[in-house]
Image (cartoon, rainbow, N blue to C red):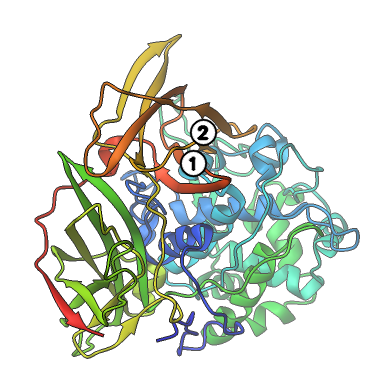
């Protein structure tokens, strides 16, 4: 069965169909983040827990919602886009610009802390998640942004500026007057203004020990038309409309700049949602000329999340995690999934005898759902497999089959991986120490190389792009050495190498060079505890194919 990136039937997306092929690490990670709300690698942190249900940053009702902070962060990053010279846009340059007056606000600092690798794509995805978490439209998300390595130009609009300055800023971003009005309304249906950031707009509390005062743009936290209706009927308490100082009433200047024609056109909930979906999509897709975004990231019907060979004691195991998507209320939700595979070596290699090995799942559990998948009424179940493997036969192509006969086989070619080099996480160690009030992690990494091979080189490459203050990512390239303190086992001989970093979400690529060929085990979480959850082995039989 050919696995297509299916278009959603509810009309939110209008992408051209594209064929998905595993592995696709960037797509896989961002698809998981968008629809499950969790990080794209083993042990990834939960993204959705921060923003779900349109929650506040803290339990204190004076705090604004996380969603409002994430949406503002995305706009402030994209606002320096120049559509005419095709520079700037949503490129994560904001992480170098948070000391500018135009980017004032603790919410921006906290949002920076929320985001991790693939920074510019995650900023865009965060805006999508924020709007959906508060009940707004689902904004189509495309990946492929390139992170800036330094600050961009100034240019985020500020409340004290004139209508002419605002109009010119939005014109450079690619928005006309009516679109400017709409985009401001689409942003200001969430959040408000804090006295800590703008004391001339919102009066600070009487006591310096008190929390800052926050005045919301409208009377709800939901993504709705209240910001429009309360403006039109005169009941608004939007601080950028009713500020004591008339020169700081930027929303009033903008909303009234066409005699309220645009605001009146947004009064319908349907018109508001559709307009905001289209304009926010354009906003997050504002990218420099050298960037080409991919197709819309849509949820995979059946997804191989992880697959690897691993050692446990002296036994080689094959572990795979397969996620199945289903609609809420689907009567077929409970059907099982089987893992099938061909041997790589021996007389039955590549299923030459017309038979395949088949295993039942060791565990089945629901995956988390993001606000996007919840709104689409999608749910996911993970089927986890752990089966013992004879090293003399190993694993070649593998695939999955449902109880009803449906196959997921990576476009008919089967899922394929190499077995020449593996991460021996059970033998690897991570230790920590504190240096100058900073936690440093030292990773003693062990790689297994098939014993019959004679590698000319074994290497590890470490990567971590999660430094909050920006700057180049952490990288390490280490030549690994034969480690005879570990006796060969499970068909593998072992090599060791070490590195240290002050970051905690490091991933590894392991390489073995054999006879001019390079074999790679890639995108493996460095921290050993994230790589080997205990599971009971599934039962195995042999079937005709």
Of 71 and 511, which appears nearest the observer?
Answer: 511
Which residue, as the protein is rendered here, is positioned at the far top? 436
Is 68 left, or right, of 260 in this rendering? left
Numbered tag placed on residue 321 in the rendering: none
Q: Is residue 455 above or below residue 434?
A: below
Of 221 and 289, which appears nearest the observer?
Answer: 289
Is residue 220 something that shows in the picture?
A: no
- For the residues bearing labels 2 and 1, Cβ distance under 8 angstroms: yes
The residue depicted at 30 percent of the width and 30 percent of the height is 428
Q: Which residue is mark 2?
A: 457
Which residue, as the protein is rendered here, is positioned at the far right? 85
Q: Is residue 425 above or below residue 243?
A: above
Q: Is residue 369 above or below residue 260?
A: above
Is 500 left, or right, of 194 in this rendering? left
Of 97 and 457, which appears nearest the observer?
Answer: 457
The residue depicted at 20 percent of the width and 55 percent of the height is 390
Numbered tag placed on residue 511 in the rendering: 1
């Amino acid at each position: 069965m050919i696995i297509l990136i299916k278009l959603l039937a509810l009309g939110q997306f209008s992408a051209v169909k594209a064929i998905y092929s595993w592995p696709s690490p960037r797509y896989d990670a961002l698809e998981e983040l968008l629809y499950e709300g969790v990080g794209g690698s083993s042990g990834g942190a939960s993204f959705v827990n921060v923003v779900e249900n349109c929650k506040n940053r803290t339990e204190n009702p004076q705090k604004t919602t996380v969603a409002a902070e994430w949406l503002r962060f995305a706009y402030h990053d994209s606002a320096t886009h120049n559509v005419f010279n095709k520079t700037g846009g949503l490129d994560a340059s904001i992480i170098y610009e948070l000391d500018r007056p135009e980017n004032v606000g603790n919410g921006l600092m906290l949002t920076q802390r929320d985001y991790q690798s693939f920074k510019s794509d995650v900023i865009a995805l965060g805006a999508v998640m924020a709007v959906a978490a508060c009940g707004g439209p689902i904004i189509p998300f495309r990946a492929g942004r390139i992170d800036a390595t330094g600050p961009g130009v100034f240019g985020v609009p500020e409340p004290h500026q004139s209508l002419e300055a605002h109009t010119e800023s939005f014109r450079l971003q690619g928005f006309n007057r009516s679109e400017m009005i709409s985009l401001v309304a689409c942003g200001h249906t969430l959040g408000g203004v804090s006295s800590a950031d703008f004391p001339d707009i919102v009066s600070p509390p009487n006591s310096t020990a008190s929390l800052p005062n926050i005045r919301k743009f409208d009377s709800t936290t939901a993504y709705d038309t209240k910001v429009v209706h309360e403006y039109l009927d005169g009941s608004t308490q939007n601080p950028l409309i009713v500020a004591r100082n008339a020169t700081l009433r930027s929303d009033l200047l903008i909303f009234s700049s066409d005699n309220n024609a645009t605001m009146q056109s947004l009064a319908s909930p349907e018109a508001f949602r559709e307009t905001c979906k289209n304009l926010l999509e354009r906003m997050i897709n504002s990218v420099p000329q050298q960037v080409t975004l991919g197709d819309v990231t849509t949820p995979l019907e059946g997804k191989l999340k992880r697959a690897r060979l691993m050692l446990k004691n002296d036994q080689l195991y094959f572990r795979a995690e397969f996620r199945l998507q289903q609609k809420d209320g689907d009567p077929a939700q409970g059907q099982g999934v089987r893992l099938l595979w061909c041997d790589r070596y021996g007389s039955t290699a590549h299923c030459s005898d017309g038979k395949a090995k088949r295993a039942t799942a060791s565990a089945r559990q629901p995956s988390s759902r993001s606000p996007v998948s919840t709104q689409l009424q999608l749910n996911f179940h993970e089927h986890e497999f752990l089966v013992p493997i004879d090293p003399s036969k190993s694993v070649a192509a593998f695939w999955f089959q449902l109880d009803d006969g449906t196959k997921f086989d990576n476009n008919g070619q089967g899922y394929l991986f190499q077995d020449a080099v593996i991460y021996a996480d059970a033998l690897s160690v991570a230790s920590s120490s504190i240096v100058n009030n900073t936690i440093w992690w030292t990773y003693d990494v062990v790689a297994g190389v098939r014993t019959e091979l004679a590698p000319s080189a074994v290497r590890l490459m470490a990567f971590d792009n999660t430094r909050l203050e920006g700057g180049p990512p952490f990288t390490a390239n280490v030549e690994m050495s034969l480690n005879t303190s570990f006796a060969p086992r499970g068909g593998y001989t072992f090599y060791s190498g070490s590195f240290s970093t002050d970051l905690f979400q490091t991933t590894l690529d392991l390489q073995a060079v054999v006879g001019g060929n390079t074999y790679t085990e890639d995108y493996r979480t460095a921290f050993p505890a994230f790589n080997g959850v205990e599971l009971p082995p599934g039962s195995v039989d042999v079937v005709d194919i």
